[in-house]
Image (cartoon, rainbow, N blue to C red):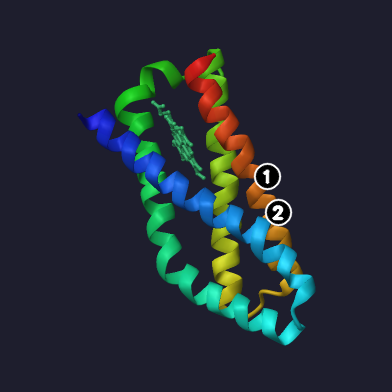
Amino acid sequence: MEYTVLLLVHLGCAILFIGVVAFEVLFLEPIRTHLPDNMMELVEAGIHTRARRFMPFVVGLLFASGIGLLWRIYWGGWYPPFSSTFSTLLTVKILLAISVLVHFITAIRAAVCNTMTSRRFRLTHYSVFAHMILIVILAKAMTTL
Ligand code: HEM
């Protein structure tokens, strides 16, 4: 029961987070070239406002449920890190997730301080998207290898 709840929350938040990042990379970035700069800035400002309200909650739950899964279900199979194939895949996945968190916090801070440029917005999107693809591959390899 505890496992099912933690897994459903983790998977649900992962779908939301990955979905938002995929939308930004696959839809938002390509329309940049078709819109005047000032219009794109307005679109980005709108996205920042929405993201500041919505995404911290999703990311917080994603990490809380991931830590819950690690602590309550997988501790014996994971610790010490790199001790088995499963442990190595999970450790790399956690390191990538921490890197995503650093991207996320610095992007939110830049948005609050008004230092987020379009170029930085774009690079952050591509980098987080690449992290997401690797995280999903590792997460599925963990349970199938
Ligand atoms: C950006 C952050 C993260 C994303 C996008 C993410 C995504 C995922 C996905 C897609 C799965 C596969 C779920 C399934 O289909 O069964 C998964 C599984 C898992 N994740 Fe994460 N995760 C993140 C962060 C974390 C963190 C920080 C931890 C631990 C500290 C963690 C621990 C786990 C564990 C233990 C599983 C295996 C669950 C199972 O299948 O039994 N995750 N994650």
Q: Is residue 16 left or right of residue 61?
A: right
Q: Secondary structure at mark 1?
A: helix
Q: Is residue 36 left or right of residue 130?
A: right
Q: Check the image and report above or below for 16 versus 94.
A: below
Is the distance from the Cβ of mark 2 to the nearest ligand 1 atom less than 8 Å?
no
**Residue sitting farthest toward the bottom:** 38
Q: Check the image and report above or below for 22 versus 115.
A: above
Q: Check the image and report above or below for 108 versus 35.
A: above
Q: Quadrant of residue 64?
A: top left
Task: Indicate the amino acid at tag 1.
Answer: Ala
Residue 80, given in percent of the width and then of the height, sits at 48, 19
Residue name at image x 52 percent, y 26 percent: 140
Q: CA distance from mark 1 to mark 2?
A: 6 Å
Asked whether residue 81 appears in the rendered view, the answer is no
Per the rendering, the mark at residue 126 is 2
Per the rendering, the mark at residue 130 is 1
Ligand 1: quadrant of the figure: top left
Residue name at image x 35 percent, y 32 percent: 69
Residue 143, given in percent of the width and then of the height, sits at 47, 20
Residue name at image x 45 percent, y 52 percent: 16
Query: Do callouts 1 and 2 mark residues in contact (Cβ within 8 Å)?
Result: yes
**Residue sitting farthest toward the right:** 33
Q: Report the front residue among 11 and 91.
A: 11
Q: Report the front residue among 26 and 72.
A: 26
Q: Residues within 10 Å of mark 2 (few under 14, many from 20)?
A: some
Q: Is residue 32 left or right of residue 144?
A: right
Task: Indicate the amino acid at tag 2.
Answer: Tyr
Q: Is residue 52 left or right of residue 128?
A: left
